[in-house]
Amino acid sequence: MDSEHFDFVVIGGGSAGYAAARTARETKNKVAIIDDGAELGGLCILRGCMPSKTLIYSAEVLHLAHEAEKFGLKIPTATADMAAIHQRKLVTIEDFASYRREQLESERFHLIRDRATFIAEKTLLLAKSGKHITADHFMIATGSVVNTPDVPGLAETPHWTSDDVLDLDFLPESVIVLGGGIVACELAQFLNRVGSKVIQIQRSPLILKETSPDAAKVVEQAFRDEEIELHTDTQLVSVEKDGEAFVVHFTQNGKAQQARAAHLFNALGRKPNTSGLGLAAAGVETRPNGQIMVNHFQQTSNSRIYAAGDVSGPFEIVHIAIIQGEVAAKHARGESPDPVNYNTRTGVVFTDPQVATAGISLAEAAERGLDVVVADYPFDDHGKSILMEAKYGYVKAWADRSTGKLIGAECVGKDAGELIHSMAVALSLGATPADLLKVHWYHPTLSEIWSYPLEDLADEL
């Protein structure tokens, strides 16, 4: 049987995989990347972060045009040209994708366009060529795939996934969105803002259960104010297609209900993409949710094999996947890198208002038994946000009383994803509220809103 040996082999050419391969290549000569996707680039560039945020920004501009009268402006008509929006997205994404392709296809790496399966602890079988691949170390970075829960009729009923929504070149008349997670909420608002009638059905009592209840409630109010038909705390009963319409049967408050629309979007989450990898043959253990178990250096239960990104968690965030990939590759080449510090992580939800966090949550602080001091301030009492008609939300920060240092922050509001980074820097540097009050918080800016809760925290510590 034909075989080839490498220093380091990466399965998956997305953000985590490329970061690992690039880092390994700094000291290793023979690094392979195995990817069997129809396109090279990974989820973020092709079907995730970049295309979704491109579309969301177009919808935000359209929404502001519709709100023109609030700003003393007359804009008689403003509508979405979906074909043009789609084309802009394609052009924008191609810029990122072409650069990634160039890197993956460069002479630095051995790019193998095939499907890989472990047949032993240190051996892969390539499906197309039948070739065996061995290596000193492996990295699994295969990402995630759409999850189709066991809802009667869902698997048999043709439905959209996020891939389909991101590729729309026409305006859907109406859409039922199943789910209330980050992807569901971002794309539900996008569809609503470009002109679709949106019915969103969430099983949990609140949408965005990844965030705090306070944050979720603000976004829920904004959705309802924008006339998204939002149903929460439901039980999905069944899904079917009735003629040209899709029908979802569900219960809410003990009452049977149904939603009907021209299209159905399954946004009920994603799951680790491990099918067909032969993890058992490799001695790689997984959690009940399918994530590959790893240690602080991203090593799996097989010390030769590492995993990073969505396939291992614990957070499905691109910059974390990149750091994980770098940590793994450094460890594989004999170093002792600093593990990923999840205590200073950041996260952003690109709804409007946005939800952004830094550090550990209040729930995590309570679980650790920390004595926490908390302060907040609303956007609807802040000068710059008032003149921008950006009144949804608040900023909130919390510190550990024993050390006086900030340990977490949350921003729900206009441009929260940008505003959170001042707190992210502070947390990473171990700053106290008093330290941050030395900053010249310029007036009038959105950023200066942080100074108000910081003053309250400094007074209490």
Image (cartoon, grey):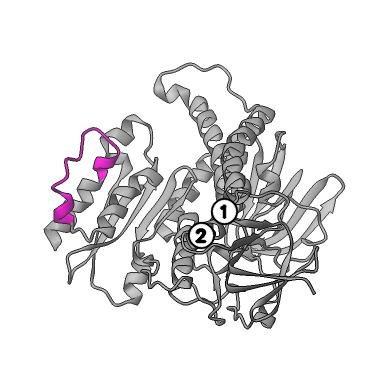
Where does label 1 land, which residue? 108
Magenta region includes residue 103: no
Magenta region includes residue 435: yes
Where does label 2 land, which residue? 25
Residue type highlighted by circle 1: Arg
**Percent coordinates x, y for residue 183 in the rendering:** 58, 52
Residue closer to the observer: 29 or 190 = 29
- Mark 2 and mark 1 lie on one chain; the one further toward the N terminus is 2
**Percent coordinates x, y for residue 324 in the rendering:** 47, 64
Q: Is residue 124 left or right of residue 395?
A: right
Region in magenta: 433-449
**Percent coordinates x, y for residue 22 in the rendering:** 51, 57
Residue type highlighted by circle 2: Arg
Q: Secondary structure at mark 1?
A: loop
Q: CA distance from mark 2 to mark 1?
A: 7 Å
**Residue 188 visible (yes or no):** no
Residue drawn 38% across and 73% down?
336
Identify the residue at the far right of this view.
243
